[in-house]
Amino acid sequence: MAVRIGVYICHCGTNIAGKVDIAKVVEFAKGLENVSLVKDYKFMCSDPGQALLQKDVEDGLIDRVVVASCSPLMHENTFRKATERGGLNPYLFTMANIREQCSWVHIDSGQTTDKAKDLIAAAVRRAFLLEPLTKREVPINPRTVVIGGGIAGIQAALDLAEAGKKVVLVEREPSIGGHMSKFDKTFPTLDCSACILTPRMVSVGQHANIELMTYSEVEEVSGFVGNFNIRVRKKARYVDSELCNGCGACWEKCPGTRVPRKGNVHEKLSLGPTTPIYMPFMQAVPAIPVIDTETCLYFKDDKHACGLCAKECERGAIDYEMKDEIVEFEVGNIIIATGFQTFDPSVIKRYGYGEIENVMTALEFEIMNCASGSTGGKILKADGGVPGSIGIIHCVGSRDKHYHDYCSRVCCMYSLKYSHLIKEKTDAEVYEFYIDMRCFGKGYEEFYDRLLTEDVRFVRGKVAEVTDVPTCKAEEGKLIVKVEDTLIGNVRRIPLDMVILSTGLEGHATLREIAKKCSVSVGQDGFLIEKHPKLGPVSTATDGVFIAGACQSPKDIPDTVAQASAASSAVLSMITREKIEIESATAEVDEDKCSGCKLCNTLCPYLAVKFDEEKGVSVVNQALCKGCGTCVAGCPSGAISAKHFEDRQIFAEIEGIFSGL
């Protein structure tokens, strides 16, 4: 029986038709071998366009489909479904990209039309050799793991748990809460951070559907969408969580010290106990301390030299012999919400961080300003005095080609918040050294306008240097900020008592490791790459793995919460389907040709190819394989082939490209 191919050419408004002569392309396509029907339509992706294709298939006019339109990334699935609705196997459809590869990248309409003809000829030749593939489905495990216990992880876990789904929340720190737990107030409403966050933390700790694993790290992720195997290391706290009631007797009597001098600002700048046995902050969830073995006298020196915390604990909760525990479990989906870390300004030597007294980072100022911190919320210099003047330097590590090109988005707003809080608590003069003020969110510009009336001094210009070397009597004992004030056109030297560096946000140090374990990618900016920046901001290239919060890009709390809820909604959509269709166009190994070199094992970006030691050949996990073809191209024996992209189909496509020469 002869193959009958239908070719459908999309105008895409003027995106294609503006540079491609559609009438000439239609006439050309009619003359191609095995083409029995050619039609053009203004928008093939629209309902009428799909209906046009579907009816021709239903009427038995064609048994192969070629659509010449835009990128397969945009609409391959759309046309596959239309083909299937007509009663044809969806893998008997192929696309010719005459927009991104043709009309959008060329100027000469004559050359563009010729190229469109070549692309269609290639697609037709490939379509002739296409074979139907069987659709495959896998069941979805309804349990989800959320990696990261900041506000993003908390929100995602609670959304899923409230929907009646089981969640495992894994956090590497001793408590959930993330960076938000270190803040005193949040912009632009200046509401109490703990008042917002703590109830949610408690809800996570008490929720029947959430298994909380703090002080734990994901060691291994295997499996595939719907059926992931997770291996977690629960690090030893040396405190039995079943016996401890968080009374604090252990750290109150502990003679050691854990927190080093930070930024030369305050000797014990901390939100929790500064002893080797500690809680990160007093609202921690769970409210169970942990022993820092690097500074604990019992572990560091002589086991008989201390052990005081064990003696003071009436419940016998201290266990110096506790070991790390490995826990394995299965989930259907993964949400990565590992958050961010702040830029280390010590690499920018001209700002003097770590070398000059009273130069501090934004996060250190947050801890100092926090009412539950070691200073009781008082803003103090290193000598304990109240500063009379404070400078806030914007864009430290951000919008800087030497470090990070991107804008961290939150720095302008938290710097404005600091100015307000300083004015509220002290009589200090406040200077904001900024490049541009970026107040993008709801109520943000209004907050900036408010600061303009609070006697804050704004200096537009990049700070050249922070020094403590005076040039006159007025500068003695001061920090001098050298800055070009671009609004008045002068270089200024401004003496101050304290300098706060508004450090940018960057991907967490562990992010690349987590990304590798979960088979997702990290971009050049150090953040996770989403499936599509506009249409798939919480999805990744690996099915069943979703991202939320500042691990995807710098963002504020409202955007983080919104993305976390979006990620949980995407997971719920997967769970409620109970089964999910997985890629049919996968690779397969001809065991008779395989030499066992294992090259394909190392090449596969999805870890889908493993070596069968018993048979001495490589095998492809069909559930993990995405059909990318990396193993096919790399196999020196030609033992691996890709369904839907066989060599003969690719060669036919190449012949079609050159058929017009």
Image (cartoon, grey):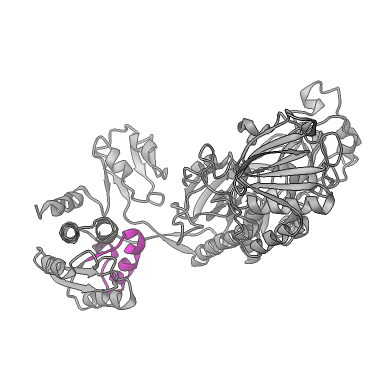
Relative image position of residue 567 (x, y in whole percent): 55, 59
Residue 516 location (% of width, % of height): 49, 41
| Residue visible at 79% across and 32% down in the picture | 258
Q: Is residue 128 visible?
A: yes
Tell me: 383 left or right of 102: right
Closer to us: 139 or 653:
653
> From the viewer's perspective, is residue 168 above or below residue 5?
above
Whole-percent x, y for residue 492 in the image: 67, 39
Side of 253 relative to 516 (left or right)? right
Q: Is residue 66 above or below residue 541?
A: below
x, y percent for residue 283 = 80, 51
Q: Nearer the viewer, residue 620 or 273?
A: 273
Tell me the quadrant of the picture where the N terminus can be found.
bottom left
Rendered view: 2 above or below 233 = below
Front residue of 644/320: it is 644
Q: Which residue is drawn at the image coordinates 81% and 21% (left, top)?
A: 302
Segment tinted magenta in the rendering: 66-92
Give the quarter of the image for residue 292: top right
Q: Is residue 494 magenta?
A: no
- Whether 70 is among the magenta residues is yes
The picture quadrant where one finds residue 99 is bottom left
Number of marks present in the image shown: 0
What residue is rendered at 33% in x and 48% in y? 628
- Does residue 642 appear left or right of residue 332 in this picture? left
Q: Is residue 177 visible?
A: no
Q: For the stretch drawn in magenta, what is the main secondary structure?
A: helix
Residue 260 appears left or right of 434: right
Identify the residue at horizontal 72%, vertical 28% (top origin): 469
